[in-house]
Image: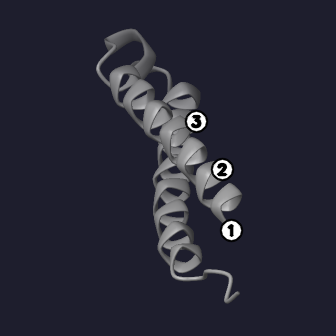
């Protein structure tokens, strides 16, 4: 169980870095004028936010599970 929690922490860190990178991309004017780049960045942002959400939910869920011995 502890290994799963460590893994989800690493995934959450990676997703949080992706969120900050995509938010930075939204500030670049030339990237936001291209509809393909804008749509791809928006989809990447949604996926990264969902990954952070599910990672937190799984960490809470697996954090309550402990071996009973």
Alpha carbon distance from label 3 to label 1: 35 Å
How many neighbours does mark 1 have within 10 angstroms: few (below 14), some (14-19), or many (20 or more)? few
User: Which residue bears the numbered disc 2?
Assistant: 7
Q: Earlier in the sequence, mark 2 or mark 1?
A: 1
Image point (59%, 75%), residue name? 62
Tag 1 residue: 1
Q: Give the answer, above or below, for where 58 lies relative to 9.
A: below
Q: Secondary structure at mark 3?
A: helix
Disc number for residue 40: 3
Please tell me which of labels 3 and 1 falls first in the chain: 1
Q: Considering depth in this image, is 53 or 31 the residue closer to the camera?
A: 53
Quick one: 27 or 15, which is closer to the camera?
15
At x 47% / y 74%, what residue is drawn?
Answer: 60
Whether the residues at callouts 3 and 1 have beta carbons within 8 Å, the answer is no
- SS category of the residue bearing label 1: loop
Of the two numbered discs 3 and 2 in the rendering, the one whose residue sits closer to the viewer: 2
Which label is found at residue 33?
Answer: none
Q: Residue at x 44, y 16 (%)?
A: 31
- Identify whether 61 is placed above or below 46: below
Please state, as top left, top right, bottom left or bottom right, where the N terminus lies in the image: bottom right
Q: Give the CA separation, mark 3 to mark 2.
A: 26 Å
| Residue 61 horizontal/vertical position (percent) | 54, 79
First in sequence, mark 3 or 2: give its number. Answer: 2
Of tags 2 and 1, the one toward the viewer is 1
- The reply to whether discs 2 and 1 touch (Cβ–Cβ < 8 Å) is no
Name the side, left or right, on which 23 lies relative to 41. left
Crowdedness of circle 2 by 10 Å Cα count: few (<14), some, many (20+)? some
Bin the neighbour count of mark 3 within 10 Å (Cα to Cα): few under 14, some 14-19, many 20 and up.
Answer: few
Question: Residue 50 in the image: x percent, y percent?
Answer: 51, 59
* Frontmost residue, 19 versus 63: 63
Q: Between marks 2 and 1, how big is the CA–CA gap?
A: 10 Å
């Amino acid at each position: 169980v502890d290994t799963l929690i460590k893994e989800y922490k690493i995934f959450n860190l990676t997703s949080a870095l992706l969120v900050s990178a995509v938010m930075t991309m939204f500030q670049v004017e030339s990237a936001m004028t291209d509809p393909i780049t804008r749509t791809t960045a928006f989809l990447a942002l949604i996926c990264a936010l969902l990954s952070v959400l599910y990672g937190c939910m799984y960490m809470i869920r697996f954090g309550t599970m402990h071996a009973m011995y």
